[in-house]
Image (cartoon, rainbow, N blue to C red):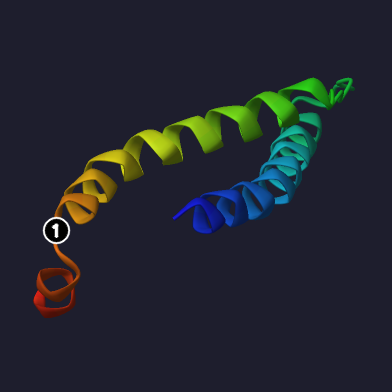
């Protein structure tokens, strides 16, 4: 689950960057104005931290349930 969360973060950062650049490009063409584009690096680290914490919070209840089961019951459980 944590791997999927981090992979989503890795895919989301470039997509977010490209989407922001595209939206700014559209606004520049539509309004005939120049806008500054800054993409600071610190939100990327904050996004990773939030992604990891939220993933762990979401995974906690199923993990606790699985840890309380016997191995045989866990293998039979679908």
Quarter occupied by residue 17:
top right
What x and y, as percent, mark residue 6?
60, 50
Answer above or below: position of 66 versus 26.
Answer: below
Side (left or right) of 17 relative to 49: right
Residue at 54% x, 37% y: name it.
Answer: 52
Side (left or right) of 3 relative to 38: left
Which residue is labeled 1 in the image?
A: 69
Asked if one can make out residue 78 in the rendered structure from this viewpoint, the answer is no
**Quadrant of the image containing the N terminus:** bottom left
Q: How many marks?
A: 1
Quarter occupied by residue 43:
top right
Residue at 68% x, 51% y: name it.
Answer: 10
Quarter occupied by residue 30:
top right
What x and y, as percent, mark residue 46?
66, 24
Asked if one can make out residue 2 in the rendered structure from this viewpoint, the answer is yes
Side (left or right) of 63 relative to 47: left
Answer above or below: position of 70 versus 13.
Answer: below
What x and y, as percent, mark residue 58?
33, 40
Answer above or below: position of 55 versus 73.
Answer: above
Residue at 87% x, 23% y: name it.
Answer: 38
Q: Secondary structure at mark 1?
A: loop
């Amino acid at each position: 689950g944590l791997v999927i969360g981090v992979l989503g973060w890795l895919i989301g950062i470039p997509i977010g960057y490209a989407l922001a650049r595209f939206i700014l490009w559209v606004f520049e063409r539509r309004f005939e104005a120049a806008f500054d584009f800054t993409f600071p690096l610190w939100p990327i680290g904050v996004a990773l931290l939030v992604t990891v914490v939220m993933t762990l919070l979401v995974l906690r209840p199923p993990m606790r349930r699985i840890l309380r089961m016997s191995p045989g019951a866990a293998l039979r459980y679908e």
